[in-house]
Amino acid sequence: MKRCLILLLACLLLTGCAARTDSSGGQELNIALSVYPLSMDPQLEIDGGSAQYLQPICGRLFRLDTEKGYVPELAESYEVSEDGCTYTFHLREGIRYSNGDPIDAQDFVEAFRRIADPQSASTAIYLLQDLCRMKNVDAVNAGTMEPEKLGAYEADDRTLVIELEQPCPYLPYVLAMEQCSPYNRAFAEACGRDYATSPETLLSSGPFMVDRYEPLTVQVHYVKNPNYIDADLVKLSGITLRQVSNTQQAMMSYQTGDQDVIATGGEYAVLSQGDPCLYQSPGGMVAFIGGNYESCKAWQNRNIRMALSFAIDRESIVKDFLRAGYSSATRVVPTGICLDADGEDFAADPEQYSSSCAYDPDRAAECWKKGLEELGEQTLELEFLSTSGSQKFVEILKDQWERTLPGFTLNARLVSAAQFNDLRAKGEFELYMIAWGADYPDPNAFLSIFESSSPVNNSRYKNADFDKLIHDAALELDPEKRFDELHQAEDLFMEDLGAIPIYTRGGAYLIAGNVQGVESHFSGMQLLFPFAEKEA
Amino acid sequence: MMMKKYIFKKFMLSLVTLFVIVLVLFLLMELMPGSPFNNDKLSEQQKAVLAKAYGLDKPVLVRFFLYLRNMLKGDFGVSYNLSVNTPVLTMIKSRLPVSMRIGVCAMLLGSVFGLAIGFLAAFHQGKAADIFCMVVSVLGISVPSYIFAIALSYYGGFKFKWLPLLYDFRNPVVSSIMPVLSLSVAVAAVIARFTRDEAVSVMKSDYVMFARSQGLSNATLLFRYVIRNSMMPVITVMAMLLVGLLTGSLVTEQIFAIPGIGFLLSSAITANDYNVVITLGFLYAAIYVVARLLLDILYGLIDPRVRLGGKQ
């Protein structure tokens, strides 16, 4: 028996002997998310999961603010040239990294050059190429021009100039992304390949610094960064962010008090309905069904598209299947995300396009009949490309469509996520569905993906008038006219029914009653928490 | 001399096996649909720049031999998309020890209980204790470990709050107890079953019957003859179980939010992160091949007939 006990003790000792490292003073916030960080290197980060984990350590020119949209963080002020293509940013005095090194304008320039450098193979290149069209970015990224000619340079230590190829009214939002935080080249080069893989090789310019981290871990611990410029605004002494992929475990962990904030959803969020601690953020992600305009004859037919749209009972999908955090969508720009300068919502009326997206089985059958006649077919069989994780959703869709549309057969083709993206990019599909989340709260983020030249326009939707409106809006400096052009573009797209919107997705979180200041990112998919407070 | 030749032959065979495994893994990754750069936000041109930066635009055989050359130098490449540009070894180094610690503990705990139950059942063959032990072990084998994990976390972590529900790197000892317990059940059950069968067969052998007829006590019989002679097949099973445990259990890792190796592999496969998949596949194979090699050497040392068989 004694031997057994010794063995058992040895077992436990083998499981590790690290001591608990609680930070002294202040309160620690524990957050359980459904994602883990893929990378803690800001310039190489592309996924929303890593963005959550990078948020506490990345100081940016601007940070997101739930009321004002964005507020200056490391920037003091900025000016825009008359043509809207040159931005001059003045940095705050005394900004420093967590190791005490000063942050100057060159560090921001280095960050942009690193993203554009083909050798760094940063997938964040889309920020400079597609979102803000930084001057010379294509040539620098292709390796045919020196990085020094990229449209970002230091006028002096505290003045950063960014030159764009076309106006970008939402540039502060792009600069509020973690990838645009300053890059200390000397520090990174001293760390070599191990840069950003441990607390010792991670540098913070934000409110917290990493205390414990290992690559691809599911748990990161942060402590307050005393060198942060707004350190007096930071009330927490530390934060632990962790991934809990099993929602049931996350719920139990929240109920036992181990976690202060958890991401929830589906049936688990339904269990919490009525709980004042349940926080549902606006749906900044739109899911829509697309079809192949090049090779799918049925999808080319507007009546067939209308029939497919009228036959979908979006309300029942949301109410009975998707549940908390989701709403039905009848337009491609979600409500509550894109506000103009006066605070008016671009998509104030969520039902504006209900004439083509309402659930109406009779009209669906009518359009279906017309569509089949135009195609000269009696029946129709289409393939729906989807990831295996969406199998249940496809089954619901199949049931609704086949029940309402006589002679229709939907075949599901379930593939891995990587294969799904690959097949979509190659145009090897008939129908598919994706959810699109915006990087900046502007209608352009939702509409420009249907431009014929967009890499995300997998449907190969082509409408010269639509393209022109998006192009004109991109060059328009008058915000009112710009919104007007984007409105016309959305009208045109919904008239065509270029894609079938199904639902918008936001986030659903349980936030303990003693925690204040945990808010939602405009996309609804991320939390803003570094300036939160927690009562003992 | 014969033993040296035998070990050398087994060693070379292991090397060839590992080479074939790397080749097959490499070709399988090549055949896998999709690309590592399948992010929606990247244009074809951007994907081409990335492929060039990582050398993925070179012919497959060139890439294979480059990979092999780097591998022999200890460089398993970097992650393409799971943890961009992070050396694969760095990623594995942080996760493998966690899976190994939990796996070894589950193995030790499972072995102690499995052996005890197995010998207890063998010595009470056909009696109530035997039937009870075997019913328990059949349950342990047939019920998946995640069921035990869920039950343990509900009762131990949530209802009675004895132990933390989730693995916590600030408190690894206590937060590993539930994962270890849930993984050790199946180990104990399998070992109990094997031990009992082997022990029963040894106890029926002539030399044990003779020893018993000489009036030796049960304890002497157990420790001097039964355990020693029935351990060989049990050790083989234990080695194979250990390989499975070292490489992590995906479901148990997910339930207790353990940063283990199983989850890394499944994420890498989903994301088409070639270098991570090949390295992990190779690691799994290497652990298995080394375990087999050690067992073969052990057999050869214990039983000279194995060495002769190897020579023939």
Image: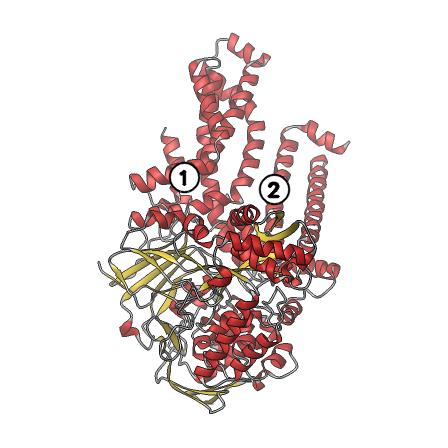
A526 horizontally vs B312: left or right? left
* A44 vs A353, nearest the viewer: A353
Where is mark 2, residue-wise? Answer: B288
Quadrant containing the C terminus of chain B is top right
Q: Which mark is residue B150?
A: 1
Q: In which quarter of the image is residue B149?
A: top left
Identity of the residue drawn at 44% across and 29% down: B113
**Residue A313 pos. (x, y %):** 48, 52
Q: Nearer the viewer, residue B42 or B149?
A: B42
Residue B231 showing in the rendered view? yes
Is B310 positioned to the left or the right of A412 in the image? Answer: right
The residue positioned 40% from the left and 81% from the top of the image is A102
Q: Which chain carries label 2?
A: B
Spatial CA span between label 2 and label 1: 29 Å
Circles 2 and 1, Cβ within 8 Å, touching? The answer is no
Q: Can residue A419 be seen in this view?
A: no
Q: Nearer the viewer, mark 2 or mark 1?
A: 1
CA neighbours of label 1 inside 10 A, class few (<14), some (14 to 19), many (20+): many
Measured as percent of width and height from the top left, residue A424 is found at 62, 60
Asked whether A531 or B252 is in front, the reply is A531
Identify which amino acid the numbered label 2 is placed on.
Answer: Tyr
Rendered view: A371 above or below B288 = below
B260 and A250: which is toward the camera: A250
Rendered location of residue B272, percent (x, y): 60, 56
Q: The disc labelled 1 sits on which kind of residue? A: Ile
